[in-house]
Structures are given as structure tokens and as C-alpha cells.
Amino acid sequence: MSDGHGRPWALLAELTHGCPLHCPYCSNPLELARRSQELTTDEWRDVLRQAGEYGVVQTHLSGGEPLLRTDLAEIVAAADVAGIYTQLVTSGVGLTEARLGALVDAGLRSVQLSVQHADAARSDRIAGHRAFAAKERAAALIRKTGLPLGVNVVLHRDNLDAVNAIVDLGVAWGAERIELANTQFYGWALRNREALLPSRAQLASAGAVIERRRAELAGTTELVWVVPDYFDGVAKPCMGGWGAVSLTIAPDGTALPCPAASVLPGLDPPNVRDRRLEWIWESSPAFNRYRGTAWMAEPCRSCPRKESDFGGCRCQAYALTGDAARTDPACALSPDHGLVRAVADSPRGAHAQAPLPHPTYDARASPAEPLRGQGEGARAPQDQIPYIYRTPAAGGRTLQPAPPAPRPARHTTPAHTSPPPPGQAPAPPPRKPPELGP
């Protein structure tokens, strides 16, 4: 295999780009895959079978909103048959007791629930959808099943000051793990950077809160703090190394070394409809392009950190410099670090003390096709959601709950991990279910 790399153990399965939310930091690409382009149930079954045979031991079923897939239980079952530990990554919108029961019966092992703020009204403003009550109900349902629950919060200017209350919320909802991930500025977040960028004072205050709460919650709730790129002068490892431990399958079957890599020009990523996972991982030009260290130029080539930070994030390097092969400008040694410092030290990043009351955001639209359901009425009234969206907001979908099914007792493993934000290495695999073996 190229460059002596091993096989992947983690798979991010982006089942759809459809989503009822309109978060301004959405990690989906600016160009979304249409529903008609999505992999079918049988195609996902084949992908998961190949992944299990190739050594993948866990998958994050994500989106968009994976609950929009009416065949979600079948996809979960396919992963379970393949011996792959499954975590559902969801907004909670549309999760009913019957739907969750069907997913548990199919083999679902854990759930990660996104939260935008501890305050319901502010959470709904950030999400662009009246969703907080649904999240609260979903947390209660998940806790009732005994599945491990994780809470994920993307942090930015409008919620960093509430980090203590957010931790309290996660604890109250029964979360075993609370991931507090500062916004990574690519895609939609880069477009909305002016409104999302926090101040240094906000970050320092939030970091101190996290340290205190970690000490208080030690042994009960795990707190994960993903530091921001722009403020500490340190580049983060790109997914634990490009094509090193994890791969992403987009809704249309495009295979990517990183969830954000579709933006890189000339990458020509392969598709699981055309190639097997083994070839994609071992032989495709896309997965070998930034693998290892041979591709690096200075200052990365001679840097002692090159085997640990891998030159930083390729997508961030491209977004800020137009060249994906350059050193990530987040690194203090990068010749382009001034691009980041200029933003971080701007009046907004350096001195601002409070979030704007009505920030202006661009918002992603769902895939541009006719949607079933409630139309614009699915979103909260504009006077309650004061963000100004410059792109068309899609209507909501009616989420069809699966019919109730008998629920035989089954083993679930009380461990889970979260899919990393782009640029962050995946967490180690969970304890394997007994049937996975050593």
C-alpha cells in the first residue's frame, strides 16, 4: 500500500444533505447533493459490507439529517451485519419513540445529538428552525433506551459566553460526552466568518470554564474542547493524517479523505459506484495526493512536527491561500500566517466583548428539489429567528416515523465517539461489541 499507510478504521457516512436546520457553520459543502443523486439502500449495504471486510470498525451515520432517510433502519442493520459499530449523528428533529425503537432493533449503538445553545430561543435562532423542544424530547427518548448519548455543540461568537450553561444542559440531558468544538472556518462557516468569529476574551473565558467543569465532572461526563484554529498559532492534524485512519462517503457516493475535501480543485475524488473501497483507499490519486510527508514543501518538509500535524488542514490552506499544498496558515511558521493573524487580531476578533444581537448570516439551502411537507411554515417566524438569510431556505420535510416493531432485548455497548470536525483527528475506536472480536 502507498506510503506504508494502514487500513481505515472509521467511516463517516453522509447519508443525505437534506436537513431541517440552517446552521450558519454547516459543514456540508456549498454545493449540496440532490436527493435523486443519493446512494440507494442497496448501494449503502454494499459500501458497508466492503467497509466491514476491509477493517472499518465504526461508522457515524450523518448528513444533513440522516433521519430524513426512510431506509435508515435498513442502513443501520447493514452496518451491524458487517460488524461495524454505529453512531447516529442527528439534530433530533423527527426522532420518535417508534423510530428510535426500530433503529435500536436494527443495531444502533449510540447517538450524538447536536445542540446550538442552552437557551431554547437562542438555539432556535442559530439553527434557523424551531428545533430545541424536539432536541429535548430526543434526549429523553435516547436516555430511556439506555443508548450512550453524546451532545455536540459548535461554538462561535453567539454561544461561547453560554458554555457553562451548555455543559449544564448536557449533564441534565444525560450525556456521557459533551463535545464543544470551536467553529472550523471553511465552507459555510468561512462565508459567515465575520459574524461567527469570537473574541480572544470570549475564548479565554470559555477555556477557563471548561477546565473548571472538567475537574467537577471527572469520572462522570467527558468534556471535549476543540480549540479554534485562528488564535493559538498551531495547525491541527488533518483527520489524523490525510488518508490515514478515516474516510468519508458523501450522499452521492463520492469518497473523500476529509469531509470538506470536495472543494479542492483537481482532486477528482473517486466514487463508490465506480470503484471498490479497497482501490479507493490504496490506489486512488485523491487519497494518495497528500498522504504521508513526501508532498510537503518548506517549512513543513523540515519541521519536526510534520509527522504529528501533517502540515495542518489542506482545505483551510486552499480556502485562505488558493493552494492546498501550502502550509496551513493557522501554523505560526507558515509564511501565510499573517492572513490568520489579521483576522484574529481584527477589532472583531481581538477586542469585541459581546455577540451581535442580530447577526447577518448566509444560510445553506437544502438540495434544490421539490420537497414534501410543510414548506416555509416549518421554520420559526422571522421575528423569532432574526438572522437574515441571503440564500433561499428550503421548506421542511415531513419525517415519516417507521412503524412500531417488536423490540427483542439486545446488547448495546455503553461507549461512543463523535465524528471529528474537518481538520480534527477521529477519536479512538469505542470498545468493540463482543461480536467484533479482539
Image (cartoon, grey):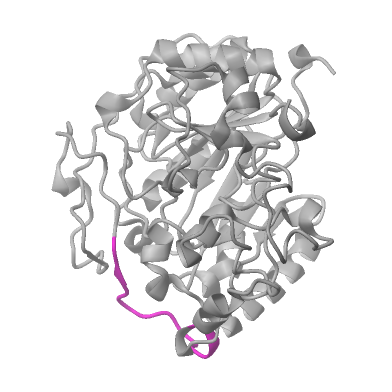
The residue shown at (62%, 53%) is 179
* Residue 357: image location, x then y, percent: 34, 79
Task: Name the main secondary structure of what is drawn in magenta.
Answer: loop
Name the one closer to the observer, 48 or 288: 288
Q: Is residue 213 above or below residue 429?
A: below
Q: Is residue 83 visible?
A: no
* Residue 262: image location, x then y, percent: 44, 43
Q: Describe residue 372's horizontal placement relative to residue 243 as left or right.
A: left
* Residue 314: image location, x then y, percent: 57, 53
Name the one closer to the observer, 336 or 250: 336
- Classify residue 387 by image quadrant: bottom left
Name the one closer to the observer, 165 or 342: 342
Name the one closer to the observer, 351 or 246: 246
Q: Is residue 177 visible?
A: yes
Q: Describe residue 87's horizontal placement relative to residue 56 as left or right.
A: left
Q: Say whether residue 350 is magenta.
A: yes
Q: Which region of the structure is painted magenta?
A: 349-362
For the C terminus, the image quarter is top right
Q: Say whether residue 432 is magenta.
A: no
The residue shown at (21%, 57%) is 391
Q: Describe residue 319's horizontal placement relative to residue 257 as left or right.
A: left
The residue shown at (61%, 53%) is 423
The residue shown at (39%, 75%) is 194
For the N terminus, the image quarter is top right
Q: Is residue 110 above or below residue 339?
A: above
Q: Describe residue 7's horizontal placement relative to residue 109 as left or right.
A: right
* Residue 373: image location, x then y, percent: 17, 34
